[in-house]
Every structure is written in structure tokens, then in C-alpha cells.
Image (tube, rainbow, N blue to C red):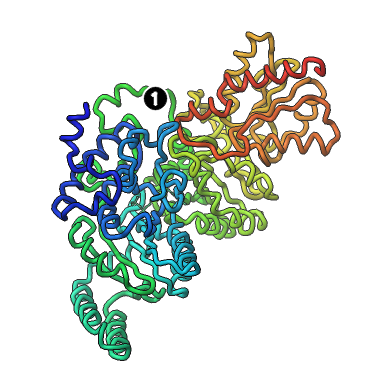
Amino acid sequence: MNEKMINEKYKLLYRINTPEDLRKLSINELKFLSDEIREFLVEIVSKTGGHLGSSLGAVELTLALHYVFNTPYDKLVWDVGHQAYVHKIITGRRDVFHTLRQFGGISGFLKITESEYDTFGAGHASTAISGALGMAVARDLKKEKYRVVAIVGDGSMTGGMAFEAMNNAGLQKRNLIIILNDNNMSIAPNVSAITNYFTELISRPEYNKLKAGVWDLTGKLDSLGDRLRKIAVRLEEGIKVVITPGMLFEALGFRYFGPLNGHNIQKLIKILNQIKDLNGPILVHVMTEKGKGYPPAEEDSQKLHGISPPSIISEKCSEDVKIKAPSYTKVAGSTFVELAKQNDKVVGITAAMPDGTGLDQLQKEFPDRFFDVGIAEQHAVTFAAGLATQGYIPIAAIYSTFLQRAFDQIIHDVALQKLHVVFAIDRGGIVGADGPTHHGVFDLAYLRIIPNLVIMAPKDENELRHMIYTAVNYTNGPVAIRYPRGEGEGAKMDDKLQNLKIGKAEIVKEGNKIAILAIGKMVSHSISAAKILKSYGFDPMIANMRFVKPLDQELISNVIKNYDVIVTVEDGILYGGFGSAVNEFVIQKGIYKSKILNLGIPDEFVPHGTPEELYKLLRLDPEGIAQQIVELIKNNQNNL
Ligand SMILES: Cc1ncc(C[n+]2csc(CCOP(=O)(O)OP(=O)(O)O)c2C)c(N)n1
């Protein structure tokens, strides 16, 4: 599309370079702008991939917020950040929006270094209220005047941290506005008591009618002094307690407004203007529709929560994309079901990611043994611990990056009590376009330090099945299996599941002089690296280590004796990870003599991009692994 065509198609949008431009538009123009933005979103995100549904649902809300609040002086704090594409587009990033989630391009989430309008980085759920409260307190300490607004989805409200923050905000009584963006959906349909509560709240017409009356009354009484106002508020409290179920937010110290139609921009602007300077913590409940304005997303908002490029909207793409192997997730999901069929004590737990973890398969087959606890990873782990005390074998399937949240629960509630919980840790390693908030690169390091925990990582999807089987049969404590995002390696699937020997590695290729000790996905990269090394005259031995804990000490001792160069390879952070474990072992045993090269992720956050781009950047692609080994040998020719 040339510039003229773009200008015609997006007439209003191309006038908006900052929210200041937005504030010059009439309400009617804002409505047309909403349509243009929806079209723009679908056009771009279908090419880049990304969180389409959530952003489509938040178009009017985002415009209204930037229209009413004086951003960036006033601070908008978006939870997760996946719904903030419109915010990006109208805060100076329209012309680079096509680089969304691309290597070197703009982030798919909020990033404090990307724009002064991104007041707080995000990617993980339920952080916005805490961050916003911190800003509000800082404002008061500095005696400044800016307003702080946190925008949180109903799914993210299921995270305990949101309530910890509300509880504290209610106590502190600072001026703070929370917008509850309620679309009744998390990624999957939102499953929680709080969702039922919202639904109940909005479906009681008698409450809404009375509430409107009382708010009107209190509004009119504003000028009549404290006493009358207190009486009116008390009257209102009384009515609410009788008519509404619990008044959760008000009990936490918030003034509740809503529910409002989040697609009626005129009304949104009116109400936001009315409440923006009220004192104390305020909660505005806004109802939106996920995927609004784009029928495929409205019809299947779960599927279109996030889309991969080329978009599933493109009709051609299904022919173009050749699937080489089932994903690790799919294989894990079918193995969970297979094991659940064999053993009625096996149960599955997800924290709001039934499809993402493959547990949707168990949900279909054994709905009574499947538990979606909401975006509540900490609870998921301790809930699993409770089940395990009673003889159940919980499989807690959680993404590596989100399991970080439950670090203490793994230590205190599971490992310390030696409970048999199976952690199926999906998205270990590099995840790609979601970037640094989502890469699962810390898991081996943060899990390795926990006593009683067995940690494995499969070289391919076939081995993943055996590892899940082994973990379910291992009754001596908790087991973590960490596997990557995306397609498997195309491995041949064995007919029968086998128990792997705990702490035993597998030699996948004999060789001499160089020994490559690889873990997880890095085994296949190392096998390809060995082919490259052949052209340099090297023939390395390759071990699939399988276990980060316990380590195969016997194998490592033998390798130290018999090889000149030992290379450890992992797709995780080097500090404290698998390579560190090998180093610690050889130093402790006093058997350190060979050159040891630790390949993995340096002490940096990994940006977003395709996995291929990122492996290359990190020199963890086969070429990078081979080259690093060649460089080591060249630099140490005299010592080897
Ligand atoms: C701690 C954590 N767990 C899981 C996720 C994955 N996740 C991203 S968005 C999302 C759903 C959020 O629902 P909601 O806040 O209602 O926003 P919506 O997508 O419905 O607009 C989930 C579960 C996450 N980002 N952070």
C-alpha cells in the first residue's frame, strides 16, 4: 500500500502522533478512529502475530483513557501489556507497529525503555495495581499531582498479587484508579469465583438502578458538608450490602463505579471525567468484548487471544506451513491422558493455560481430574502439594517463566515435604516473539538449588513421554521436566513408555578428544554442530545428559579422564545452570584438568525475535556451537 492509500484508509489514525492529537478530536471522530484502529490492528497483527483479541476489545477504553487523562504526565499502568497495542499505536509507535514482536522491532508487551508512555514494564499478569500504588505513593511523597490509573483484566484479577495490592491500596487510601477490563475471558474462559462474582454483580438490575440513584444523591450532597455526606454513604452501604453479593471491592476500601459498556466511548469519557479527581481508591468496572469488531475473533476469542504469523486468518497459510512433528506440548498432553487412563490418581493442574500446556486433552477426557485454578501459579503449586499429601499424583503443567512466581511454594510446600508433585514445565528455553518477559531461561538455575527435586529435560518429544512416565512412577519426591516451546524434533515414537534410570545420561554419539554434554533441545543442536565440526577434522562425543539433577557423576568423571575438551550446552542462563553444576562437581571432586567450555545464555536478558534469530544471536545454533568449540581449540592449541 502506498502512502496516499494509507492516508485515505486511515485518515484519522494518521493524524494521531501523540495523545495530544487525540484530544483535539470530537467524540464522533473518536468513533470513526476506533473503526480505523480495528482495521489497522487486524491488518498488521495478522502479519506479525500477536495478541489480537485482547487489543481489539480495548480500543474504546484505550482511546477514552488517553483522551481524559493527561498522559504521559498522568500514568497509565497496563497489566500484562498484551492488550496495549492501541496504546502503542497512539503514543508515537504507529509507524513502527509493523515491527511488533520482530527481532529488533517493538515489543509485544510494555517496555519502560520503549516509550515514556510505558510507565511500567509487563508481560506477567497481576502486577499493575502494585506498580501503580508504588507510583501513587511516590507522587504523594514528592508532593506532585499526577493521576495514576491501573488497567487490569478480569483474568489477571484471579492472580493473588492483584488482591494483595488492592488490600494495601484500600488501607493506604491514596488517589488511585483501577480500571477493571472485564471481558469474562482469560485466555480460556475465565474460571474463578471472582468471575462469577462479577457476573452476579452486573446482572442484578435492581442493584444497578438503586446504585445509580444513590450515586446521584451522594453526588448532589457533595457540597452539603461532611455529615450529610456520611449519612448518604452509610445509606448506600446499607443498600449495597443487602442487594449485592459481598461488595468485595468496597470491602477492600475502593469506591466502585460501573459496570460500564466499554465500547460506548462517549459514556466512558463522561464517567472517567467525573471520577478522575475523586479522592481515594476508585475501581471502575468496564465490560468489554474480546475480539470486538472482528467476527472471527469475536466467535473464537480463545483461539484469537494470540495468533502466530502468518495469521490463521490468512487462507493460504495452512497450505504453506509444513508441520514436521507434533509440538512438545501436544505430546505432553496426550501422555498426561495416557497416564491418567492407567492410574486414577493422576490429576492435572493448570494456571489459566489449558490449551497452552496441552492439559485441554485431559480436561476433555477426565473433567473431574482437571483443575484450572486461574492465573495463580503459586496457588497451583501448593494446591498440588495438598493433593499429593492425600496420595494423588498431580501434574502441575506450568510455563517455565510463570513458574518463577511459585519459587517459594516449590521449596516450602513441595520439596521440603518431599511430596510427589510432577512439574511439567513447558516453554523452557527460548520462546521467541514474546521476548524477555517470557523466555524460560532461568528454570534450570532456579530449580537446581532446591533439595529433593529431580530435574530432567528431554532431547526430543519421544523422550519427553518417557520422562513424564518416569516422573509419575517416581514416588520419592517431586520431579520437574522441562521442555521447549514449539515443534518436536520429528523423533520416532516408541510404542511402549519406559522408566528412565534416574540420574543416568545417554551417549548419543561416540567420539574422541572433545566431549559435548548437552541437555534438552541442545542435544539436537549439538548433533548438528558435530556435523559442522567434522569439516574441521573434529569428531566429538555427544552425551544427552537427561538429568540436571541428579547429575550423571560417573559419566562426567569418565569424560574428564578421557577427553581434552568438555563442552556443556544448555538453552538456559549460564549462572547456576547445568554447566555450573558440571563445573561444581569437577572442582569439588578435584578432577578438574581438561578445558571446560560452558555454552548457554550469558548474564543478560534475551530480546524478542524468532527462535532461530535468537539461537544465532546467542551462538546456540549448530553453527554457533561449532564455532565456539573451534575458537576454544584454536586459542588453546599449546595447552591441549
Ligand atoms: C503470571 C502469568 N500467568 C499466565 C500468563 C499468560 N496470560 C497472558 S494473558 C492471560 C489472560 C489474561 O486475561 P485478562 O487479564 O482477562 O485479559 P484479556 O486477555 O482477557 O484481555 C494469561 C493467562 C501471564 N501473562 N502471566
Quadrant placement of the N terminus: top left
Question: Which of the two residues, 369 or 69, is positioned nearer the viewer here?
Answer: 69
Rendered image quadrant of residue 147: bottom left
* Disc 1 residue lies near ligand 1 with CB under 8 A: no
Residue 251 can be seen in this image: yes
Q: Label 1 sits on what residue type?
A: Ile
Write the residue at 71% across / 22% down.
515
Q: What element carries label 1?
A: loop
Write the residue at 30% across / 39% down.
94
Write the residue at 84% across / 31% down.
591
What residue is disc 1 on?
323
Residue 371 can be seen in this image: no
Q: How many marks?
A: 1
Where 613 falls versus 232 (above or below)? above
Instruction: Please rate how many residues cluster around mark 1, counting C-alpha atoms within 10 Å: few if below 14, some from 14 to 19, many from 20.
Output: few
- In x, y percent, where is residue 54? 31, 48
